[in-house]
Image (spheres, rainbow, N blue to C red):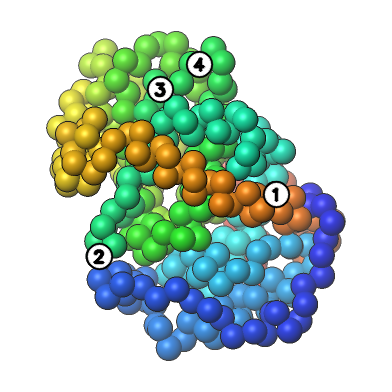
Amino acid sequence: MFNNFVIMDPIHIEAPPIIRPLSPALETVAIKELNENPARLADDLLTLRRWIWSQPHLKARTNDQFLLAFLRGSKFSLERAKQKIDRYYTLKAAIPEVFNEQRQSDDPLVLEIVRMGVILQIPLPTDESRPCVTIIRSTAYDINKYKFADIIRVGSMFGEIMMIEDDNSTVCGYLEIMDMIGVTGSHLFHLPPDLVRKFSIFADEAMPMRQKGTCFINVPLSFEKGFNAMKAFFPEKMKNRITVSSSIDVIYDVVPAAYLPEEYGGTNGTINDIVKRMEAKLLKYRDYFLNERHYGTEEKLRECSVKYDYESHFGIEGSFRKLDID
């Protein structure tokens, strides 16, 4: 449920969209792979704005780049984009361990995790047309001090920033590299299966960016079977995009070495450089995350005979699988 429901100004709803232009390389990918039609973008964005305005149960952001991410993530099917926007806000309410009052740019716990370099967003050249890359250093934090939900919370914040300002992520998707160096049985037991399952469904069904793959590196040989068992918690589509290796060399098959930080054999600065950039970027979004409490869904206002059931959605049958979006 959201607080302080604010009526949107109809003049704002009809204002001409302002869209950040793509680089020529990314525009080619968007047109070929996502069915993007530059001449139709403004009309599609206006259609989404009007639809959000017409939904009494939904208070969603109407920022042009935010909505464009959902159009690209739905390959410009307006009906699928509507469904994803609705799921995005509805499923957030079903994961309070992650989406809570601590999800703020200047929250001390959030900043601690950023500064440890647990999550590293790798900067790509502006003319590159490949998926954006995030390295997750799974053992860079003390599991006795931080919960897995704390790590996911920070990751979700940067994921949201990516979908607003990173064109590589919305056009080409994203690639995750999970560095498991030094992992022990304690680290695996630290992962709550229910949260892993729920967040993987959220990422797959509600986030507009396409996951192009997850590459586990530096995995102890003895844990390979354990990681394969963990795949059971992921949606089928995601299972086929996961690779596991006890070596670091596999990373160079998916990301040019020159794009990686020095600690991973590259020349793209250091981990500390990346951390400083990420902290500065996160703090610029302070007001954005403060305002998150104004957005969400109010299920009692949903104009549908099928009321949303969080538990059933995360189970075998979910309400959204039965819900028609006009």
- Pointer 1 residue: 290
Q: Amino acid at mark 1?
A: Leu
First in residue order: circle 4 vs circle 1: 4
From mark 4 to mark 3, how far is it between C-alphas?
9 Å
Position of residue 76 in the picture relative to residue 28 (left or right): right
Residue that appears at 60% across and 61% down: 85
From mark 3 to mark 1, how far is it between C-alphas?
28 Å
From mark 2 to mark 1, how far is it between C-alphas?
33 Å
Query: Mark 3: few, some, or many residues within 10 Å (few <14, many ≥20)?
Result: some
Q: Amino acid at mark 4?
A: Ile
- Pointer 3 residue: 140
Position of residue 64 in the picture relative to residue 29 (left or right): right
- Pointer 4 residue: 143
* Circle 4 SS class: loop
First in residue order: circle 2 vs circle 1: 2
Query: Mark 4: few, some, or many residues within 10 Å (few <14, many ≥20)?
Result: some
